[in-house]
Image (cartoon, grey):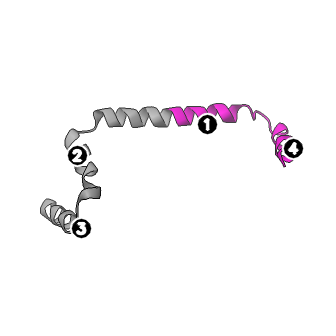
Amino acid sequence: MLKYVKGSLENIDSVEMYPIISLLIFFTFFVCLFIWVITAKKAHIEEVSNIPLAKDEDLFNSKSKES
């Protein structure tokens, strides 16, 4: 099966650019994610980290207070 895929890819012009583009997209995404994590407000991080521990009533009450 790899023989068929390899044969098809050899016929595409500039196929060597696809891995480079994929790497750049991957790298850019994680650099942006890292910057977002570093610059995120600590209060927001604490609020989001407590969501799995909160009961449904607590979540509903905190949302209704914000509105």
Label 3 CA crowd tier, 10 Å (few <14, some 14–19, many 20+): few
Which of labels 4 and 3 is toward the front?
3
Label 2 to label 4, Cα distance in Å?
Answer: 51 Å
- Residue that carries the numbered disc 3 in the rendered image: 56
Q: Earlier in the sequence, mark 2 or mark 4?
A: 4
Left or right relative to 58: residue 23: right
- Residue that carries the numbered disc 2 in the rendered image: 46
Q: Which mark is residue 11?
A: none
What's the residue at 48%, 37% (across, down)? 29
Label 2 to label 1, Cα distance in Å?
Answer: 33 Å
Looking at the rendered structure, the kind of residue marked 4 is: Lys
Say if mark 2 contacts mark 4, CB within 8 Å. no
Label 4 to label 1, Cα distance in Å?
Answer: 23 Å
Q: Indicate yes or no whether the magenta region holds residue 9.
A: yes
Q: Which mark is residue 22?
A: 1
- Residue that carries the numbered disc 4 in the rendered image: 3
Q: Quadrant of the C terminus?
A: bottom left
Looking at the rendered structure, the kind of residue marked 1 is: Ser
Residue 15 % position (x, y): 75, 35
